[in-house]
């Protein structure tokens, strides 16, 4: 499939022992910094637009920086950041007195924060890269924040910030969250100051405030106003660290801690690999929960918001997360196997004249699952054939060998070629270059006879299929091409972290609109627009997804056939082979991935009111650009 921009990656580390401990046990004072680099590199798949690193030095003396931060843009941001950091750290740092390192050497501290970013709001640039800072001379009022999130109610958040008397300089969900959490942190500091000022004097008063900060209370005061999917991570200059997850669990977070370290990341196998710990020791942060580490290094989890319906993102499991997670590997195989019954009907159980392959590289695990399912079915066919031979007295050695020799025909037909430099070409010349991003293995298909089945993990826009894959597959001269998607039809935008916000990005939407026009039901298109407009004045919890009406007259197969027609409609490059599309069903998805039922991009069932509001607005924008 064509790559999607999607949710970000986060990494947090908190040391629970003095720096001397890590130098003695692991041989380096940069132990945590080295681990942060690995956590970020192993989550590089989650964000290649920008990256950032922040370190809090709890033992920095007054007059020296207690929060060090470095950010960079581009796919090489991680390497550039750590090269810069490396230049700030003396080459002989491990020979220096540990107390001097702890006090004065930048980027070596007690709290480490890493972030990988894809922008989902359309805003990019270094000012939007995480971590973001709210500096203050009081350590307990200084705040560093990063997150994997997208909020659907930024306007409401902005209005609340302004109504409190603040004057935000930037209109973005990141800045609104920073200001809201920062304001609540100020309030918590002020509460403690009022409580303690009669019994303590500075600097003891300031230090006691640092010791008694209640970050659960801070988060509980602001998080109820957030609508979206998020894992919000932060730390104060005085040593409190936190991560809070949305009440529906839309965005992922996993953590591990022992007597040496606390670590949180967006993916479980990353923690397993970097810290060499077993799978069952890495925990998933609960929906609406916060992981809290106070100044003393004590670890706890606290419920911040009531747990909502489980809407953990299924696209995480299908495509975004690393397939090295044991559960994700099993789920992706199950997705492939779930397609087998309908696929075999499409090829009329003709194993002898069907070649099975996959679109590299992310569909490979689903392909393995599909193959296992096909082999089970073929074994059943072989058993029935042998029983039939026995019943008719034809069970000769030769006949039995012929039955047993049948195999599922597996070939690596599609090859991901070197990345083409297409920026120097324009128009049809560029399209021709794009067509060669993939190549094929010739001689794998019997020309004019075989059906070629190729599985992909998802078909969203269809651009790569139309411009490259189908044209290349047609070169091996199959009689028929069946493109299989291990995920269901992507019909609706996502507003919780994946960069799919416009309806015209989806080939399923174009197919449904085409079908409505073809059958003379353009009235549905116009009525849906009016219904979306009417929703604008309703309270959030009364809004519904009006765009479902566009798909309602049709079955999944109707939409799939229309998608196939769109894909082969390029008159400049007509295909010789017949083309069909097979999508995963919603039932198949949920059977394969039962614990991650979030499916709003497939079903249109958004987990929060903000999703329904934004999908209706997306339809209004599409209609007014295309129909008026």
Image (cartoon, rainbow, N blue to C red):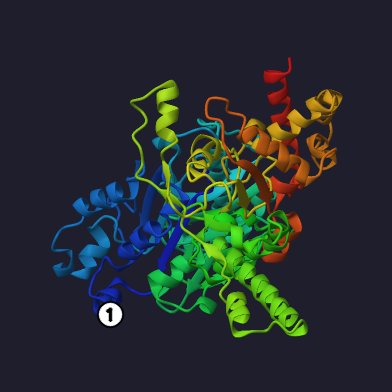
Residue 192 in sight here: no
* Residue 27 higher or lower than 218, as above or below: below
Q: Measured from the top left, where is residue 27 in percent x and y?
A: 23, 75
Of residue 608 and residue 100, the one placed in the foreground of this image is 608
Q: Measured from the top left, where is residue 454 in percent x and y?
A: 56, 52
Q: Measured from the top left, where is residue 190 in percent x and y?
A: 56, 51
Please identify the quadrant where the C terminus is shown.
top right
Query: Which residue extends farthest top?
Result: 628
Lateral position of residue 217 relative to residue 52, left or right: right
Of residue 437 and residue 158, the one placed in the foreground of this image is 437
* Residue 395 higher or lower than 212, as above or below: below
Residue at image coords 62%, 51%: 485
Of residue 275 and residue 376, the one placed in the foreground of this image is 376
Of residue 456 and residue 279, the one placed in the foreground of this image is 456
* Residue 32 higher or lower than 78, as above or below: below
* Residue 35 higher or lower than 140, as above or below: below
Q: Residues within 10 Å of mark 1 (few under 14, many from 20)?
A: few
Residue 14 in sight here: yes
Q: Measured from the top left, where is residue 540 in percent x and y?
A: 79, 39
Q: Quadrant of residue 32?
A: bottom left
How many numbered callouts? 1
Q: Quadrant of residue 491?
A: top right
The residue pinned by badge 1 equals 25
* SS label for mark 1: helix
Lateral position of residue 32 relative to residue 382, left or right: left
């Amino acid at each position: 499939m064509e790559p999607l921009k999607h949710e970000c990656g986060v990494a947090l580390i908190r040391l629970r022992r003095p720096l001397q401990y890590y130098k003695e046990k692991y041989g380096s004072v940069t132990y945590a910094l080295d681990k942060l680099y690995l956590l970020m590199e192993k989550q590089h798949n989650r964000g290649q637009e920008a990256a950032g690193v922040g370190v809090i030095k709890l033992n920095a003396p007054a007059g020296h920086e207690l929060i060090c931060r470095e950010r960079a843009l581009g796919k090489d941001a991680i390497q550039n950041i750590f090269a810069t950091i490396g230049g700030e750290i003396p080459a002989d740092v491990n020979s220096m007195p540990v107390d001097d390192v702890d006090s004065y050497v930048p980027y070596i501290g007690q709290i480490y924060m890493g972030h990988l970013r894809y922008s989902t709001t359309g805003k990019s640039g270094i000012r939007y890269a995480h971590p973001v800072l709210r500096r203050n001379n009081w350590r307990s009022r200084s705040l560093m924040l990063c997150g994997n999130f997208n909020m659907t109610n930024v306007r409401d958040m902005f209005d609340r910030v302004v109504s409190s008397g603040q004057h935000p300089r930037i209109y973005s969900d990141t800045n609104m969250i920073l200001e809201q959490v920062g304001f609540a942190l100020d309030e918590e500091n002020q509460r403690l100051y009022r409580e303690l000022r009669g019994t303590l004097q500075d600097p003891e008063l300031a230090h006691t405030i640092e010791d008694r900060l209640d970050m659960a209370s801070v988060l509980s005061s602001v998080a109820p106003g957030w609508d979206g999917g998020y894992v919000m991570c932060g730390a104060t200059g005085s040593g409190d660290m936190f991560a809070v997850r949305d009440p529906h669990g839309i965005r992922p977070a996993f953590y591990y801690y022992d007597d040496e370290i606390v670590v949180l990341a967006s993916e479980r196998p990353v923690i397993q690999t970097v810290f060499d710990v077993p799978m069952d020791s890495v925990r998933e942060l609960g929906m609406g929960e916060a992981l809290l580490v106070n100044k003393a290094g004590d670890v706890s989890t606290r419920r911040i918001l009531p747990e909502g319906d489980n809407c953990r993102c299924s696209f995480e499991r299908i495509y975004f997360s690393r397939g090295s997670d044991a559960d994700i590997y099993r789920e992706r195989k199950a997705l492939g196997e779930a397609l087998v019954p309908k696929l075999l009907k499409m090829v009329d159980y003709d194993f002898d004249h069907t070649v099975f392959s996959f679109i590299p590289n992310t569909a490979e695990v689903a392909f393995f699952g599909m193959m296992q399912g096909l082999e089970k079915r073929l074994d059943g066919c072989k058993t029935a054939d042998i029983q039939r031979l026995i019943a008719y007295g034809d069970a000769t050695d030769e006949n039995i060998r012929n039955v047993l020799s049948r195999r599922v025909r597996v070939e690596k037909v599609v090859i991901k070629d070197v990345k083409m430099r297409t920026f120097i070409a324009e128009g049809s010349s560029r399209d021709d270059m794009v067509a060669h991003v993939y190549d094929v293995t010739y001689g794998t298909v019997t020309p004019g006879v075989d059906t070629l089945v190729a599985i992909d993990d998802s078909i969203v826009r269809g651009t790569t299929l139309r411009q490259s894959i189908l044209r290349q597959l047609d070169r091996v001269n199959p009689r028929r091409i069946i493109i299989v998607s291990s995920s269901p039809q992507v019909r609706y935008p996502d507003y919780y972290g994946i960069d799919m916000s416009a309806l015209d990005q989806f080939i399923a939407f174009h197919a449904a609109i085409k079908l409505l026009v073809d059958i003379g039901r353009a009235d549905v298109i116009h009525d849906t627009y009016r219904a979306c407009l009417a929703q604008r004045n309703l309270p959030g919890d009364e809004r519904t997804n009006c765009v479902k009406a566009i798909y309602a007259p049709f079955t999944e197969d109707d939409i799939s056939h229309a998608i196939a027609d769109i894909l082969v409609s390029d008159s400049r490059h007509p295909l010789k082979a017949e083309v069909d599309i097979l999508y995963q069903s919603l039932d198949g998805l949920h059977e394969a991935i039962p614990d991650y039922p979030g499916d709003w991009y497939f079903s249109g069932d958004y987990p929060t009111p903000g999703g329904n509001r934004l999908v209706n607005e997306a339809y209004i924008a599409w209609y007014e650009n295309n129909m008026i």
